[in-house]
Image (cartoon, rainbow, N blue to C red):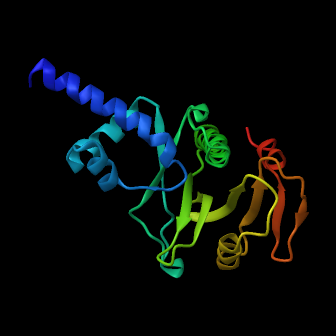
Amino acid sequence: MSSLERIQDLGQLELMMISLPERVGSPLSINNLREDLQVSHKTASSWLAVLERLYAIFRLSSIGSPQIRAVKKEQKHYHYDWSLITDDGPRFENLVASHLLKWVHHQQDTKGLDWNLRYFRDKDGREVDFVVTDRESPFLLVECKWNDGDLDRNLKYLKAKFPEAEAWQISAVGEKDYVSPEGIRVAPGLKLLQNLI
């Protein structure tokens, strides 16, 4: 490989890194990335793996359970530096993802727990931002909103499927704080985040 090709690849890798913040919060399509950058699927996958190893991004898989018809292959990604995201809603979601990941890693490292951070998406398009699992069993469900709003119907659906799981709908600037009839805590984000490591 010539040095010119390497420079071109670095430029394409930089374009990928620039394009990723606007894709935060949605399932990450490697096909769309490779088409935008005009590289092969293998190259796009390999570059994403490099960015993960460099602690630029982290990816979350969907929980997989036959009872919820989960989409298993799609992953979402987030940035370790959430200040790269310019839109308020996705930036708040990325901030929450980072705190939940740190909390999960702390539990894994200090207590040896088999916890993982996932998200939920099914074949009908229902999605919940974050699901923390213990041995692949959901015990914490979190949906992020920028402001106060109605209770998210997808979160209600998932809570009904896993009634033992603690469920939160948190907001960045909202002020509502209550527990819904379904047992979902609706509150400002700080109420949840202040309890995490």
Quadrant of the image containing the N terminus: top left
172 w.r.t. 26: above or below: above
Residue shown at 61%/32% (left/top)?
83
- Residue 145 in the image: state x and y as whole percent: 72, 56
11 w.r.t. 40: above or below: above
Residue 135 in sight from this viewpoint: no
183 w.r.t. 8: above or below: below
Q: Which quadrant would residue 142 be assigned to in this image?
A: bottom right
Q: Residue furthest left?
A: 1
- Residue 120 in the image: state x and y as whole percent: 55, 65
User: Which sits in the foreground, 172 or 48?
Assistant: 172
User: Which sits in the foreground, 39 or 62?
Assistant: 39
User: Which sits in the foreground, 23 or 42?
Assistant: 23
Q: Which quadrant would residue 44 be assigned to in this image?
A: top left
Residue shown at 61%/58% (left/top)?
129
Residue shown at 22%/47% (left/top)?
42
* Residue 23 horizontal side relative to residue 130, left or right: left
Quadrant of the image containing the C terminus: top right
| Number of numbered tags placed on the structure image | 0
Q: Which quadrant would residue 106 be assigned to in this image?
A: top right
- Residue 188 in the image: state x and y as whole percent: 83, 51
Q: Residue furthest top?
A: 3
User: Which sits in the foreground, 166 or 172?
Assistant: 172
166 w.r.t. 40: above or below: below
Residue shown at 27%/48% (left/top)?
34
* Residue 10 horizontal side relative to residue 74, left or right: left
* Residue 140 horizontal side relative to residue 180, left or right: left
- Residue 18 in the image: state x and y as whole percent: 43, 34
